[in-house]
Image (spheres, helix red, strand yellow):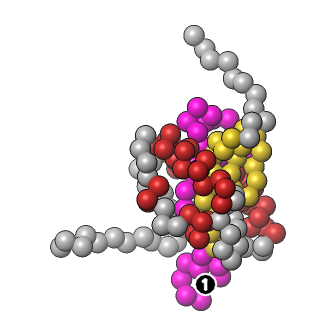
Amino acid sequence: MAQALVAYRVIVRPMTEEDITGVLAVDRKIFGRNRSLTYSDPVQDYVGGEVNLSCVAEVDGKVTGFILCHLAEPRLGMPKVAWIGSIGVDPDLRHRGIAGELVKALLKQCQSLKLNEIHVMADRHDEVLEGFLSFMNFRPAELVHYVRSAGE
């Protein structure tokens, strides 16, 4: 039986400290466990700070999606850029354009601040995320992320 798509009025707005509980609830719904300790300090890193770039999406007054983003300097001497730490949408509301609206809101903020780039790190094997990022006109960057095991 086909599911009927229900029209939702989505409001995207800057994230506030009061939204942290809703953001973590969406994150738990996505990952099935409490990962709140993986965010170093969401208030310091993503709400306020030098420039508040994080946004939430609301449906019926409830946080249903988020984009956590902060200002970063990728390398000493390079211009500051927006750096996305995480994007999440309530699994029950996916494929309805919410993540795209969050990215569009971030783009508007970056344009108003005259930031030239938005960066995000992604697992190169995550085809769903890669597809979304490609659809939103992100492309692989020239910077390369290196990692080394500490136990070697």
- Drawn side of residue 27 relative to residue 95, left or right: left
| Residue underneath mark 1 | 78
Up-down relation of residue 28 to residue 2 (above or below): below
Percent x, y of residue 33: 41, 44
Percent x, y of residue 119: 59, 66
* Residue 57 seen in render: yes
- Based on the picture, tell me whether residue 147 belongs to the magenta stretch: no
Task: Give the crowd class for mark 1: few <14, some 14-19, many >=20 residues within 10 Å.
Answer: few
- Drawn side of residue 124 relative to residue 11, left or right: left
| Quadrant, the C terminus | bottom left
- Based on the picture, tell me whether residue 83 belongs to the magenta stretch: yes
Q: Residue at x 52, y 47 (%)?
A: 27
Percent x, y of residue 26: 56, 44
Up-down relation of residue 38 to residue 61 (above or below): below
Which amino acid type corresponds to the residue marked 1 in the rendered image?
Answer: Met
Q: Nearer the viewer, residue 151 or 27?
A: 27
What number of labels is visible?
Answer: 1
Q: Nearer the viewer, residue 13 or 5?
A: 13
Bounds of the magenta span? 72-101
Q: Nearer the viewer, residue 130 or 8?
A: 8
Q: Nearer the viewer, residue 44 or 80?
A: 44
Q: Residue at x 74, y 58 (%)?
A: 14
- Drawn side of residue 95 relative to residue 34, left or right: right
Q: Residue at x 75, y 32 (%)?
A: 8
Up-down relation of residue 97 to residue 1 (above or below): below
Q: In which quarter of the view is residue 76 placed? A: bottom right
As drawn, the residue found furthest toward the left would be 152
Q: In which quarter of the view is residue 81 placed? A: bottom right
The local secondary structure at tag 1 comes to: loop
* Residue 133 seen in render: no
